[in-house]
Image (cartoon, rainbow, N blue to C red):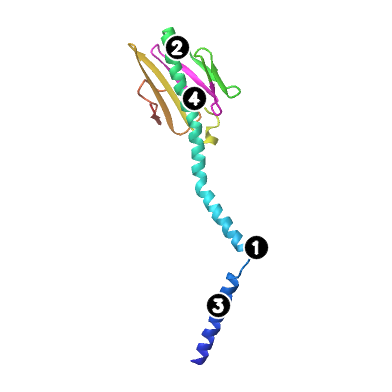
Amino acid sequence: MIKQKKQKLTQLFLINRLFQSLTKNKQDKGFTLIELLVVILVLSALSLITYPTVIAQIGKARETEFKNVVGVVNRAQLAYYLENSAFRPNELILATNNNITDPLLGININVKYLDSYTINLDGTTGATVITTNNEAPTDGTRAYSGAIYQSSGNYSQIICQSESVAIDGIAPSGSTTCPTNFLVLK
């Protein structure tokens, strides 16, 4: 019994000494390797958690440029139609020096991620626009397309967004219908 009490006291003494050595003032010693490793592990875990969110936000910002271009082209097509009683003829418009210039529609758009857009007439009552981003697989961006239609003086437009990452959009088939695997935005 006395031997067991002596062993317990010895264990308590050793635990107390260990605790004291751990809680000593360490002003002169700096950080231990274990402390640095714990901090590095915590920071690594936080970066792994936030990385996908940051990348997704970058992709959304790039997609905003594509949506804006489709909207600007649709509005410019409307103005062109009101002046000429016809939509702008078919053409592929390429981006050069971060600008897309279309003299017939009278637009000059500053772009950073868009490579080109294509205008196609849809009979005599409408025109479509399709954006192209060759870096979509790397950027993680979706494709956009749009159209504007007129019928008896009434105008309607549509903007479509692909459900997954894609380089090129697909032209809408009418003023209210987006292609398969595309969502209607407007």
Q: Name the mark on residue 162.
A: none
Q: Is residue 100 left or right of residue 169?
A: right
Discs 4, 3 touching: Cβ within 8 Å:
no
The residue indicated by pointer 2 is 80
Which of pointers 4 and 3 indicates the residue nearer the eye? 3
Residues at marks 2 and 1, CA–CA distance in whole angstroms: 71 Å
Q: Where does the magenta region start and end?
A: 109-131
Q: Is residue 80 visible?
A: yes
Which of pointers 4 and 2 indicates the residue nearer the eye? 2
The residue indicated by pointer 3 is 16
Amino acid marked by disc 2: Tyr
Q: Secondary structure at mark 1?
A: loop
Which of pointers 4 and 1 indicates the residue nearer the eye? 1
- Residue at 48 percent of width and 35 percent of height: 60
Discs 2, 1 touching: Cβ within 8 Å:
no
**Mark before the other along the chain sequence, 4 or 2:** 2
Vertical side of 149 occupied by 53: above or below: below
The one nearer the camera, 129 or 35, is 35
Residues at marks 4 and 1, CA–CA distance in whole angstroms: 57 Å
The residue indicated by pointer 4 is 131
For residue 179: magenta? no
- Residue at 43 percent of width and 13 percent of height: 79
Amino acid marked by disc 3: Asn
Residues at marks 1 and 3, CA–CA distance in whole angstroms: 23 Å
